[in-house]
Image: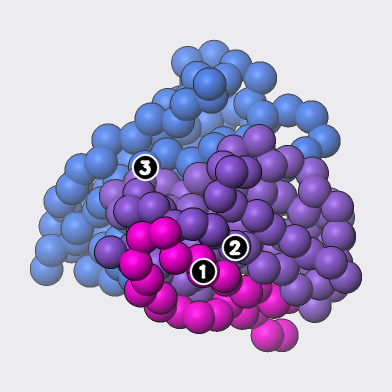
Amino acid sequence: EAGVAQSPRYKIIEKRQSVAFWCNPISGHATLYWYQQILGQGPKLLIQFQNNGVVDDSQLPKDRFSAERLKGVDSTLKIQPAKLEDSAVYLCATRTGVGTDTQYFGPGTRLTVL
Amino acid sequence: QKEVEQNSGPLSVPEGAIASLNCTYSDRGSQSFFWYRQYSGKSPELIMSIYSNGDKEDGRFTAQLNKASQYVSLLIRDSQPSDSATYLCAVKGGGGSYIPTFGRGTSLIVHP
């Protein structure tokens, strides 16, 4: 079974530029999460999807961050415009959504904002 | 604000020893508790979950939960250099949605 795929793996941008990350979940996993992990900290949940609906986006900085999961499969996370403090690893994780708490994490995208 | 506290370490133990990692949480309504291992530059990997008070063993790993004292711990027996990683504690509150709060992690170094 293929794991959670993310791209790109690395991205370097200037502040005020835009950037987008992509996540492809494990087949059949209805629940998808985007986390931000700043160096030396634990992952912080940005948004949770159940199929194509948003369950929780209370910690998503909506003035600059947006995310979508249009067909309930792939998801994109966008930052526009980026700030220096957005430098972090962005992790996508998925879960079957039925009877289990186990999340499977993708490899992450390391973003550096200069 | 739900908080999960961990000592950032590093915790250094010799090979073969028992490593003890601790985590405290602020939300008394928390229902589910998880330990993740994260190697440097890699993504977190679930190694243990625990839901009720007491101990849960899986191979060399034992998770311990005490809801009255609001702490959860992870013991690693016969520590190996390959166990060197950051261990993240995650806590989920009650209710239907799965919104985990992660601690900052404890760095474990197992030296030969």
Residue sitting nearer the eye, A21 or A64: A64
Q: Which of marks 1 and 3 is in front?
A: 1
User: Which chain, by letter, is blue?
Assistant: B
C-alpha gap between disc 2 and disc 3: 25 Å
**Disc number for residue B101:** none
Q: Is residue A25 left or right of residue B42?
A: right
Q: Which amino acid does label 3 sit on?
A: Arg
Residue identifier under label 2: A78
SS category of the residue bearing label 3: loop
Near mark 3 (Cα within 10 A), the count class, few <14, some 14-19 or many ≥20, is many
Examine the structure image and report whether residue B101 is included in the region drawn in magenta.
Answer: no
Examine the structure image and report whether residue A11 is included in the region drawn in magenta.
Answer: yes
Pinpoint residue A1: horizontal percent, then vertical percent. 71, 85
Whether label 1 touches label 2, CB < 8 Å? yes
* Rendered image quadrant of residue A14: bottom left
Residues in magenta, as a range: A1-26
Pinpoint residue B51: horizontal percent, then vertical percent. 66, 36
C-alpha gap between disc 1 and disc 2: 6 Å
Pinpoint residue B74: horizontal percent, then vertical percent. 41, 43
Name the residue at 20% across, 43% down: B9
User: Which chain, by letter, is purple?
Assistant: A
SS category of the residue bearing label 1: strand
Whether label 1 touches label 3, CB < 8 Å? no
Q: Mark 3 lies on which chain?
A: B
Name the residue at 13% across, 63% down: B111
Q: Are marks 2 and 3 on the same chain?
A: no
**Disc number for residue A19:** 1
Residue identifier under label 3: B104
